[in-house]
Amino acid sequence: MTQPAARRPGVPSGPRSAAGPWDLSFLRVGTLVTLACTVVAVPVVGLLAGWAEALGVVLGAAIVTAFFCLSGFAIAWAGKIDDSFTLPAAMGAFFVKVIGFFALLQALPADGWPDRVAAAWTVIAGALLWSGVQARWVWTRQLYYTTPPAPPAQQVGGVHTAGVQPHDVEHPAEQRQDG
C-alpha cells in the first residue's frame, strides 16, 4: 500500500482557508436550493403531467442530493488522508453513483409510481443545478492552492509581533555606512 506523501520540513500543514481544508458547506447550500426547486416543481409537474411524474421529481431530487453528498464526504475523507487520494476517491464515488443510478432506474416499474423518466430528467437537471451551486461556491471563496505567507509584522502596544524586531528591517532611506 502506498504511504501518503511526507510533509516537507518548514512547510506548515495547516488549513488552506478559514473554513478548513475540506469545507463541505456547499452541501447545505445545494440541499436548500434543491429543496426550493423541488417545492416549486412538484406541484407544477403534478398538475401538468400527473402525480406519478411529480413523485419522480421528488425521487430524482433525493437521488441527486444523496449522490452529491456521498461524493463530497468521500472526497473530503480522502483529502484528510492525503491530497493525492482525492482524484481516486472522486472517480470511485462516480463509479458507485453510476452503477447505483442504473440499478435504481432498472428497479422502478416502466409505467407506474414513480415515473422513472421524470426521475431521470430530474437527476440531469439536479446535477446541473448542483454543478452551478458548486461553481458559485468555488468562485466566491478565497481558496489557497498553496500555504499563504505569514501576515506582516504588526506593532501592538510597542511590541512587534511575528518575531520581527525594529532593527531587523532596513529602510531604504537609511543607508549603511559600513564601508
Image (cartoon, helix red, strand yellow):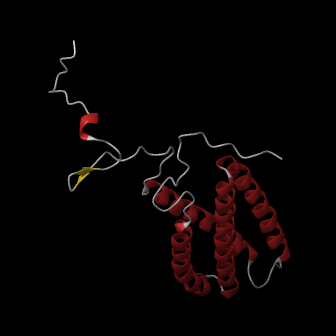
**In screen coordinates, is 133 left or right of 126?**
left
Task: Say which quarter of the image contains residue 156.
Answer: bottom left
**Position of the C terminus by quadrant:** top left
Q: Nearer the viewer, residue 25 or 107?
A: 25
Q: Which of 173 and 59 is in front in this view?
A: 173
x 22%, y 16%: residue = 178
Q: Which of 109 and 3 is in front in this view?
A: 3
Task: Say which quarter of the image contains residue 152.
Answer: top left
**In screen coordinates, is 43 left or right of 92?**
left
Looking at the image, residue 144 lies above or below residue 60: above
Q: Where is residue 44 in the image (x, y as percent from the top left)?
A: 55, 83
Task: Say which quarter of the image contains residue 21.
Answer: bottom right
**In screen coordinates, is 34 left or right of 52?**
left
Q: Position of residue 94 (x, y in %)?
A: 73, 58
x 74%, y 82%: residue = 114
x 66%, y 77%: residue = 62
